[in-house]
Image: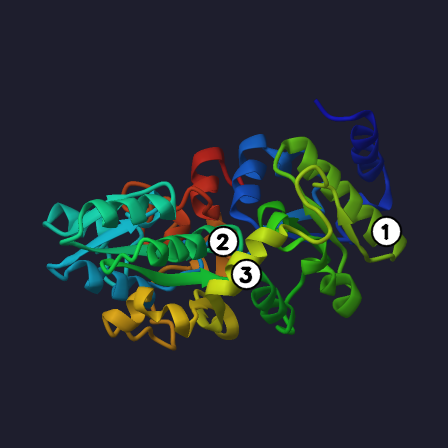
Amino acid sequence: MLSENCTADIKKWQSSGMQSSDVPVNLMEVCGTHTMAIAKAGIKRILPKNIRLLSGPGCPVCVTPAGVIDEVLRLSSREEVTIATYGDMLRVPGTARGDTLAARKALGAKVVVVYSPVDAVSIAENNPAKEIVFLGIGFETTAPGTAAAVLLAKERKLKNFTVLPLLKTVEPALRTLMADPAFNVQGFLCPGHVASIIGEEGFRYLPEEFGMPAVISGFEPEDILLSVRNLMRQIRNGEPRLENEYRRAVAPEGNPKALAVMRKCLEPCHALWRGLGLIPDSGLGIRSEYEEYNAVKRFQIVFPEQEPETACRCGDVIQGKLDPAHCPLFGTACTPDDPVGPCMVSGEGACAAAMKYGSEEE
């Protein structure tokens, strides 16, 4: 049920100049959970036609390039290795279509799904003869848990547990997006989950450096609509600032304990992003004092520095350049049962959301 104020504002947009096709407004959500929630609630269909919600690089699985997945698949083929991973990673293809962790598991690779990095530590502790490698994927939201798993493994003196660090941070990606002269977005729906860790201050640069309206949003339809309303007010009034709509979960300073765990165990490193390329200091690697728990070191893994060419257009989708329905593969060559790219696989992927709940372009 929408608040009276929110409903009134939507009606006002529909009867005002803001609805005119001559005044297009592009707003970008930077969280895969927002993408799925927007699609499920049908929010795009009730907004004025000139207000477009674009998906950004907010799905950790989707921003991981195919070449990096290839390294994960190669690691899974080692006889001594058991891969522990979140379920979303199972069906993400590498550069060869159909080559996934699920397919490798069917052929005999040892792959287990876990719900927490600590679960992977427990598996290592209970199976001392096996090499357990946890795929540490995610943004600042999951980074503290990954770091805590490393600290726990050290505390328990485990010798058979490592993390393959695939963690990324949001700010460098947004700065890269905004450095593109073709970038056409007038406001950001900032990710509530990430903000709960890094705090309001983690997004202050958007209005202060770039004059970009920004609202940290929760995940209920009401949250998202209120955040869109607040962004539109900022744009209409020409007063860009950072607003925190998700105050019930996000403090100005974030979560100090989670940040402390991250800083103790992790440090910035270069990372390759799907669609965005190699971005300096946009990843989180394991600090040298914990390198015995770094799968990159233990197994001599070399990640690519360039993204391989594939038919997948996920890179354009996560930059807001392409609606999923406009991809020539969408719903034909690329489906949930036979995906070409991760945006069709992940539970936070824009293509998966459009396929399940319908595209804005329908």
The amino acid marked with disc number 3 is: Gln
Q: Earlier in the sequence, mark 2 or mark 3?
A: 2
- Packing grade of label 2 (10 A; few <14, some 14-19, many >=20) is many
- Packing grade of label 1 (10 A; few <14, some 14-19, many >=20) is few
User: Which image quadrant is residue 123 in?
Assistant: top left
Give the farthest residue toward the top.
Answer: 1
Could you tell me which residue is drawn at 58 percent across and 68 percent down?
A: 172
Gap in Å between the C-alphas at discs 2 and 3?
26 Å
Picture coordinates of residue 279 (x, y %)? 51, 74
Could you tell me which residue is drawn at 65 percent across and 74 percent down?
A: 181
* Image vertical order of residue 127 relative to residue 147, above or below: above
Picture coordinates of residue 137 (x, y %)? 40, 56
Q: Select label 2 or label 1 by which is in front.
A: 2
Q: Which of marks 3 and 1 is nearer the N terminus?
A: 1
Where the N terminus falls, by quadrant?
Answer: top right
The amino acid marked with disc number 1 is: Arg
The amino acid marked with disc number 2 is: Pro
| Residue 319: image tag | 3
Q: What element carries label 3?
A: loop
Q: Select label 2 or label 3 by which is in front.
A: 2
Residue hosting label 2: 144
In the rendered view, does 98 fall on the left or right side of 14?
left
Is residue 180 in view?
Answer: yes
